[in-house]
Image (cartoon, rainbow, N blue to C red):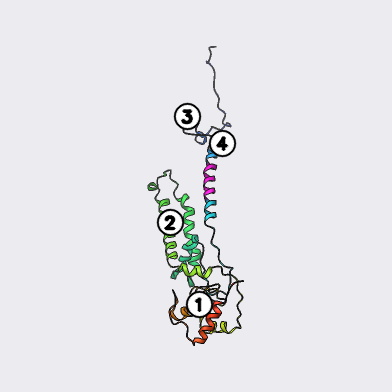
Amino acid sequence: MHRGKGMKFVGDSRVPVSNKKHIPKDYSEYPGKTEAFWPNFLLKEWLVGSVFLVAFLCLTAAHPSPLEKVADPTAAGYIPLPDWYFLFMYQLIKYTYASGDYNIIGTLIIPGLAFGALLLAPFLDRGPERRPSKRPIATGMMLLAFAATAYLTWESASQVDWEARAESAKIVAEVEVDKESEGYLLYQDKGCIGCHGGNLEGGPAGKALVDNGLSPEEISNIAKNGQGAMPPGMFEGTDEELQKLAEFISGVTSK
């Protein structure tokens, strides 16, 4: 018998045929265009991450996080405000059909639909294209989300009186005020307490008066003629009352 004649090849159906589409390509065909994941690629990732970490640490050291005074549920002058990344939600619930009786719409339904749409975007647009112009659904959803977030954040930030909020949240040194003194009673009766607080800690409409560094004469002059946001003529009383009030305010110091 000659070689190869009379031979028969039999296939076995129990042996699965290899699915080549799931086998990764041999990237050794592309010299210079690939590199080993360990340690080459991973080392580069770590180096980039380290640069950003050091830069972030330097930023936090140069500009520490601003602290506010201890939370006080009785402080009516405090202006509450969420962190900047929640300002767009804060602005959303100011609108008519997202607040009040419709609060559930602004706090649950609209955010749920928005984040649900972003979550489903990869499943709605499963094409092989990677160009934004070729992926209208995913691109449109992301642009709409960015535009809505940017607009609501800007609107919210533009409506905040940042100076008044900083004044209302400023850390004020502890002070013991004699609330039975004649000076404090005048401070209370003449309406000063409404703007400057019960412990002279200040508020959205008035500055803190603790450790003000002013003489009684300077305080009397401000009470008569005004200063900054304080209009003239706010004090209504006799010169003797004004003198006692000014001496009291001038003498209020922290511990």
Q: Amino acid at mark 4?
A: Pro
> Which x, y percent locates residue 253?
58, 73
Q: Earlier in the sequence, mark 3 or mark 4?
A: 3
Q: Nearer the viewer, residue 185 or 248?
A: 248
> Does the segment drawn in magenta span residue 132?
no
Q: Earlier in the sequence, mark 2 or mark 3?
A: 3
| Distance from Cα at disc 2 to Cα at disc 3 | 41 Å
Q: Which residue is mark 2?
A: 146
Instruction: State the SS at label 3.
Output: helix
Q: Nearer the viewer, residue 162 or 105?
A: 162
Q: Amino acid at mark 1?
A: Cys
Q: Which residue is mark 1?
A: 195
Q: Residues within 10 Å of mark 2 (few under 14, many from 20)?
A: few
| Distance from Cα at disc 1 to Cα at disc 4 | 64 Å
Residue 29 has which mark? Answer: 3
| Distance from Cα at disc 1 to Cα at disc 3 | 77 Å
| Distance from Cα at disc 3 to Cα at disc 4 | 21 Å
Asked if marks 1 and 2 touch (Cβ < 8 Å), the reply is no
Look at 60% across and 83% down and name the residue there.
181
Asked if marks 3 and 4 touch (Cβ < 8 Å), the reply is no
Q: Which residues are magenta?
A: 45-55
Q: Residues within 10 Å of mark 3 (few under 14, many from 20)?
A: few
Total marks in image: 4
Q: To which quarter of the image does residue 252 belong?
A: bottom right
* Left or right: 157, with 50 as reference point: left
Look at 52% across and 55% down and name the residue there.
62
Foreground disc of the pair 1, 3? 1
Q: Earlier in the sequence, mark 1 or mark 2?
A: 2
